[in-house]
Image (spheres, helix red, strand yellow):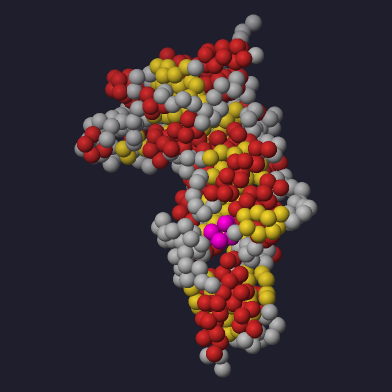
Amino acid sequence: MNKVLMSGNNIIGEAAIRAGCRFYAGYPITPQNELTEYMAEHIRSAEGGVFIQSESEIAAINMIAGASAAGLRVMTSSSSPGISLKQEGISSMAACELPGVIVNIMRGGPGLGNIRPAQGDYFQATRGGGHGDYRTIVLGPATGQELADLTMDAFDLADKYRTPVMILADGMMGQMMEPVIFKKPHPRNYPEKFMLRGAGNGKSKFIRGLLLDPIDSEGHNWKLARKYAVIAQNETLREEHLTQDAEMVIVAYGTAARIAKGAIKRLRDHGLKVGLFRPITLWPFPEMKLRALSAGIKNFLVFEMSTGQMLEDVRLALQGYANIDFHGRPGGAVPTPAELANVVAKFYSKID
Amino acid sequence: MSKIVFQHPQSLKHNIFHYCPGCGHSIVHRITCEVIDEMGIRGITIGVPPAGCAVLAYNYFDVDMIEAPHGRGPAMASGIKRSLPDRIVFSYQGDGDLAAIGMAESFHAANRGENITVIFINNAVYGMTGGQMAPTTMLNQKTTTSPAGRQQRLDGYPVKVSEIFSKIGGVTYLERCSVSSPAGVNKTKKAIKKAFQCQLDGLGFSMIEVLSMCPTNWKMSSVDSCKWIDDILAKEFPPGIYKDEIAALKKAAEVRS
């Protein structure tokens, strides 16, 4: 297929439909409206495709939960405040082991915040977000091409582990236009036994998250925990950029990682040996891969468009192994590569 | 030759109800299963039980079921029905579930004219949590959170769901019944059957509100609970058909074809 130029929000929509997503429900919120609009225009053209503009984000997540149980590939999207509303449903989907893709095009927070790009929802995304002992797989794309690829992968991961998967991008990723090539999606492999389609002449099934017996409930929690351990073992993704000879490595994801790449180019032009470690899966966090880098590199700088959230995961990976510094721009402020380069240069100058 | 006129419904599991003696849930479960049997739709029916006493409905209904978070039944049912338009999908909801925390989901599923059926149990209290004030609690009715009785000035009015929903464009069939008497039970069963038929015919949103006993939280005997429905609750929430567009929609469909 040819390269096409599309905005990030539209790329996610197109990739989802190509991946076989046949049910989308969403509620308007900036800066992700183009995705809802794309689905409204295109999903019904696909056979059996359903679009519902829901009355709320709460309704949207429960609509996709129902459609997921019915056996469809499903997606909903929103931006930060709307994702908070979805948490009840995400927790419920995790409990009921319902696959589904949730897109968060993050904006400034807390509260209503603003509609500028930000990364303040990292904790919410990677720690489960809703109540109870659960995790969601969280993918952090940084380019238009990755939005396409990871959206398709998100559906496969959701099916493979029967769990909700979140795509965590921000307003910059959603709004920016970039060239993209859509890869061929994998055929779906999701057994009918997990679907609720009427009992026919057979035994009836039920799907539930309520387990009143604490021993049953404990067993279910451990079953989920074992699944999350398998995911943590097998599904981490990261990119390493110019780390071979680096004296200092920036750890950043999504838009922040792109800004970091721009900064690194400037720093390298001035002879500063700086590289980038970019987690692509935010949960599971590529902890061991990051720690492995600390065998040769002793200086790490975490850069986030937040007050320091992924920083905690980096500390878990590197505390005691290397020096960790932090630079953050929260609340919708987006630094230029030149600004970041200046900040990094200051930290770099303190390296012994 | 003798004829079987009464037996355990096939789509009702052989589990002993966990409901309190005199509770209306078990009656509504049973007659819904009778309807499912009579219509021969067990294999294509998917139910969505709520949070509340009926959260364990899947222990009784021998049809596919998925539990919804509190109040979200109609949203989940919408998702299922749009995915599988030829299945019969119903949500089963209490008064807190439908008229408080899930009012938005219920209202908008109705307004979209989702081709689903809502069985709405109105017993004027939150049952499972121990008898707190519900949106349908009567004025001056004492509950654990309205210990001096529901005060209009502080707590607002009983929410008249059928009256409100009868004004919604997407609603095709809407009836309020009561299971406080054998005649009421028969009427409720007929109404549920009509609602399921409405859905089977693809005619849109149907809802049956059922005035139902909660002797435990009303702190009454089972007999007094039935009497309280007839004397008090049914005066505030009069049974009857609140909307019936079935004939008109069928006629319009005939004209079109």
Quadrant in which the C terminus of chain A appears = bottom right
| Residue A161 visible to the viewer | no
The residue sitting at 78% across, 53% down in the picture is A1
Q: Which quadrant would residue A269 be assigned to in this image?
A: bottom right
Along the line of sight, the residue nearer the viewer: B201 or B145: B201
Highlighted magenta segment, given as a residue range: A170-175
| Residue A176 visible to the viewer | yes
Give above or below for B127 relative to A103: above
For this orientation, the residue located farthest to the bottom is: A352
Give above or below for B56 relative to B123: below
The residue sitting at 38% across, 38% down in the picture is B100
Residue B45, given in percent of the width and then of the height, sits at: 61, 29
What secondary structure is the stretch in magenta mostly built from?
helix
Give above or below for A77 relative to B10: below
Residue A186, given in percent of the width and then of the height, sits at: 76, 51
Q: Is residue B147 left or right of residue A272?
A: left
The residue sitting at 71% across, 47% down in the picture is A18
